[in-house]
Amino acid sequence: MTKPPVRRSGQQVFVLRENPDERDEFFVLLIDPVYREGLTLPGGSAEQDELPHLAARRHLETETGLVLALRTVLTIDYVPAAEFPEGVNFVYAGGMITPQQAETVRRHQPPDEIRGLHWVPESKLPEVMADDQCRRVQDAWDAWEHGAGLPLLVRGVPVPVG
């Protein structure tokens, strides 16, 4: 291709923790960015030639303090050009974190473009997220609960787990 189309590649991470008071309830980690209304999953755009799972990992660490191995894609969300440039968002399975990792998130000071970090139960997602973001998280949650997801490949080879 002599002139490939320009398209944004978003990388987000779905991270859960157990409710310490009720073992059968889980919370998803969301960020409150200054550049949009409502909460969203941690993440951001990949830079040119940056491997997508490493971009997701970089954004997750910067925004939340967590460093997780990311290999499985839970959902892919195409976003036509409107408010943002046309894009494809990949949501990675960050998994269930430990109480120690949850403490890391609690102590982490996010960058200035993030107002705060929040743990939200699935039932409250529609109250705190824009509709499109909420649907993306609900789809990722459903894939996670059912053990669905696809391995990320780079040039046909699964990325390493570590």
Image (spheres, helix red, strand yellow):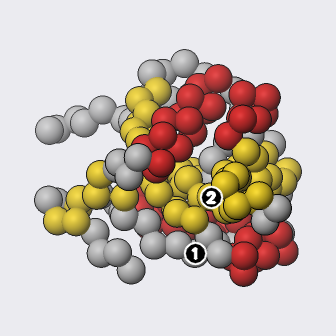
* Whether residue 19 is situated above or below residue 128 in the rendered picture: below
Q: Position of residue 42 (x, y in %)?
A: 63, 53
Q: Residues within 10 Å of mark 2 (few under 14, many from 20)?
A: many
Q: Which residue is mark 2?
A: 16
Q: Nearer the viewer, residue 58 or 130?
A: 130
Amino acid type of the residue tagged 1 in the rendering: Val
Identify the residue shown where x is 59% and y is 58%. 15
Q: Position of residue 93 (x, y in %)?
A: 47, 57
Question: Which label belongs to residue 29?
Answer: none
62 left or right of 93 in image: right
Q: Earlier in the sequence, mark 1 or mark 2?
A: 2
* Whether residue 71 is situated above or below residue 134 in the rendered picture: below
Amino acid type of the residue tagged 2 in the rendering: Leu
Q: Residues within 10 Å of mark 1 (few under 14, many from 20)?
A: some
Q: Nearer the viewer, residue 34 or 159?
A: 159
The image quadrant of residue 8 is: top left
Q: Position of residue 72 (x, y in %)?
A: 37, 58
Q: Which residue is mark 1?
A: 67
Q: Position of residue 104 (x, y in %)?
A: 75, 76
152 left or right of 43 in image: left
Label 2: which secondary element: strand
